[in-house]
Amino acid sequence: MEANRPFRWDLIRPDNLGSLLDDVQIWELFFLDDLVRCAARVLGQSGDGELHFVGRSVDSLFDLLSGALADTEWSTRLHPLPLSMFGRDGAAFTDGELRQLRTNLAAAGLAPAELMRGRPTVFVDLVHEGSTFENLYAVLRRWVDDERAQWDVVRRQLRFVGITSRTETSPNTWRWQQHAEFAAELPAAAIRNVSLDARIWSYFGDYQYKTAASFRRTRWTDPDVADPRRDEKTRMALAEAVRLVAAARTPKVRRRLAELLTREPAISERWLRDLQRGLR
C-alpha cells in the first residue's frame, strides 16, 4: 500500500505558480499580528520538538512559521499533517481505512518506531472540544501496542498544543483537556494551550478558504487529492498564503517573533535561545 497525500504548493519557492494568481485580489492580512503572537507561544510550548500541523485550520500558522524560519535550522522541523479526523470520523475504522491511515502517518514520520527516537513529536491544531487530538491519540496508542513498541518511551515524546478561542478565564472556564480521557495517560507537560483572539480563531476554523479539500477518511485512498486545485476559492486561499509567507520572511516579522520569544518561560533553555538568535 502506498501513502496518499493531498497536493501542496511550495510557498517558500513559489516558482511553480506561474500566472495562476495574476488576477486574484485578496484582502490585507488582518490577522498577522495576532498570528505572530500565537506562533511565538506555539514555539515556546514545543519543547524543542518536531511540529506537525494537523488538518487545514492551522495552515496559516504553518505558512507563517515556514516563512519566518526558512533560513534557520528549524526549517526542517515544520510538517503539515493533512488529516481530518474529528468526532465520529475518528472511530470504527475498517481494516482498509486503518491500513491506509497508518501508511499515511508512517510516510509523515509518525510510525511507532519513529516516535520513540529523536526529538519530541508535537501536534498542533485549533481545538474546540479536542476530538481530533483524542482520535489521533487513540490511533497512535493502538498502533504502538500492535507494533509492540515501548509505550513508556513514546508517551514521554508526545505533545499536543491546542490553539483555543480566547475567553475570559475563571475557575469555571471549560477546558478541553480536562474532559479528554487520554490526557490522564500523558505527563502533565504533554498538553499545552495557546489562546487566539476569538474572531481570528473562527476565521481560521470556520470561514477561511483553503488550498486543499478536507482530507477525510473517504478521501484517504483517492488519487485525485494529489492533483492541485485551481478553482476561484483555492486561488484566493493560495494568494493569501503566498502573501503571508512573504510577510513572514521580512526582517520586521522575524524581529517581532524573536522579541516575543524572549517572553516565553522556555527562553531559559538553550534550544529556544538558539532559535531566537537565529531569527535575529
Image (cartoon, rainbow, N blue to C red):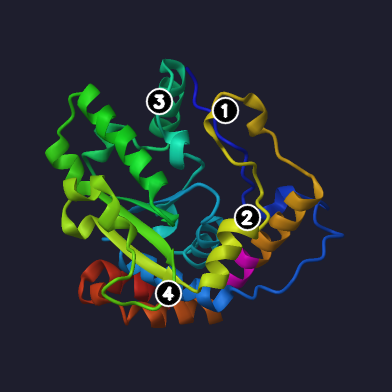
Q: Which residues are magenta?
A: 244-249
Q: According to the image, label 3 marks what residue?
A: 92
Q: Residue at x 24, y 46 (%)?
A: 181
Q: Of discs 1 and 4, which sits in the foreground?
A: 4
Q: CA distance from mark 1 to mark 4?
A: 35 Å
SS of the residue under disc 3: loop
Could you tell me residue 71's position as x and y percent? 48, 64
Q: According to the image, label 2 marks what residue?
A: 11
Lateral position of residue 191 relative to residue 128, left or right: left
Q: According to the image, label 1 marks what residue?
A: 218
Q: According to the image, label 4 marks what residue?
A: 167
Q: CA distance from mark 2 to mark 3?
A: 36 Å
Q: CA distance from mark 4 to mark 3?
A: 34 Å
Does residue 244 appear in this view? Answer: yes
Q: Residues within 10 Å of mark 3 (few under 14, many from 20)?
A: few
Q: CA distance from mark 2 to mark 1?
A: 27 Å
In terms of depth relative to the viewer, which is nearer, 12 or 211? 211
SS of the residue under disc 1: helix
SS of the residue under disc 2: loop
In terms of depth relative to the viewer, which is nearer, 19 or 123? 123
